[in-house]
Image: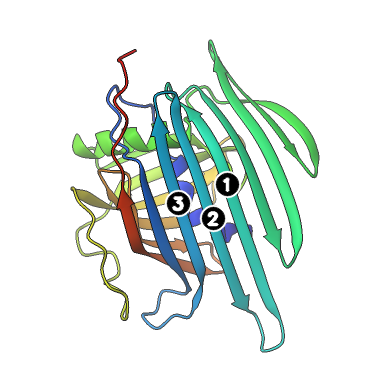
Amino acid sequence: MRLLVCFLAVSAALGPACAEAQMQPHRAEYVLRLGPAANAPRIGTAVQDLTQDCGGWHLKRDITTEIAVTSSWKMSLQSKLDAEEQRSGNGLRFRTQQTQNGNERETRGRVQRAGKELRAEITSPSGPQQFLLPPPTLMPVASIDHVIERLRARVPSFPALSFDTEVIGDAFLVDVSELDPGVLRGERPGERPVAVPGRSWPLMMSFTRGRDQQQRPLFMLKTQLFDSGVLDRLTVETGLVTVTADLTSLEMRKPPTCPRS
């Protein structure tokens, strides 16, 4: 059930940061549903809160779901992320708390670039780990900036490596492709559309383990990505379950005025 949080793993994607950040601080709320049908049952909510100061980015994410597997058996999952990313994109500290049916799991991690090396140190209930990531692996916010830049440059498809904090705690190899307009599912009935400023692109992304180089994707994701970094109309397919997410509330924030480095 940890894959229920992967619909927001796209924010950990896809390439080196550009000189001028395009990601905008914002707070977004989503409703989650089980399945792609228009009348699919609600299974939870998600909140992503991204703030910025002159030192870098602070990301908080809170996902709560409950699925009725049978009439007498329900499965609940809560995932919380608290992360800080350096403005340069060279460092990340994070803490995740995931609770499944009352069983809590906490993970703390640090990723730091030093010269040509990118080192990860992660402590979880399984014990501490230290390992090297492929040098092109990017941090969450820095990476989404470059996705937007590549799309603005009309690059229709490209692969990249990105670090994920919640699903695998390792590097993802992500293949990104721009979809034709109108391919994404329509608005959900009963939900008031949320106006998001700026240009957007419909995307398909496939996620595989970056270090293992396995051929079969862990999951596929479709979404509408706006040039502010806001996501909407997400659909995640894992092979076993399909989860959809729609934006229900959005607050855009002004970035700080910082001296150029």
Residue 208 coordinates in the image, percent (x, y): 53, 45
Residue 3 coordinates in the image, percent (x, y): 58, 58
Q: Is residue 160 visible?
A: yes
Q: Is residue 219 visible?
A: no
Residue at which label 3 appears: 48
Label 1 – label 3 distance at C-alpha: 9 Å
* Kind of element beneath mark 1: strand
Q: Residue at x 24, y 40 (%)?
A: 151
Label disc, if present, on residue 62 of the rendered structure: 2
Residue 72 coordinates in the image, percent (x, y): 71, 87
Q: Residue at x 33, y 34 (%)?
A: 145
Q: Quadrant of the C terminus?
A: top left
Label disc, if present, on residue 81 of the rendered structure: 1
Q: Is residue 175 left or right of residue 154?
A: right
* Mark positioned earlier in the residue sequence (1 or 3): 3
Label 2 crowd bin: few (<14), some (14–19), many (20+), radius 10 Å: some
Q: Is residue 83 above or below residue 19?
A: below
* Kind of element beneath mark 2: strand
Q: Amino acid at mark 3?
A: Gln
Q: Amino acid at mark 1?
A: Leu
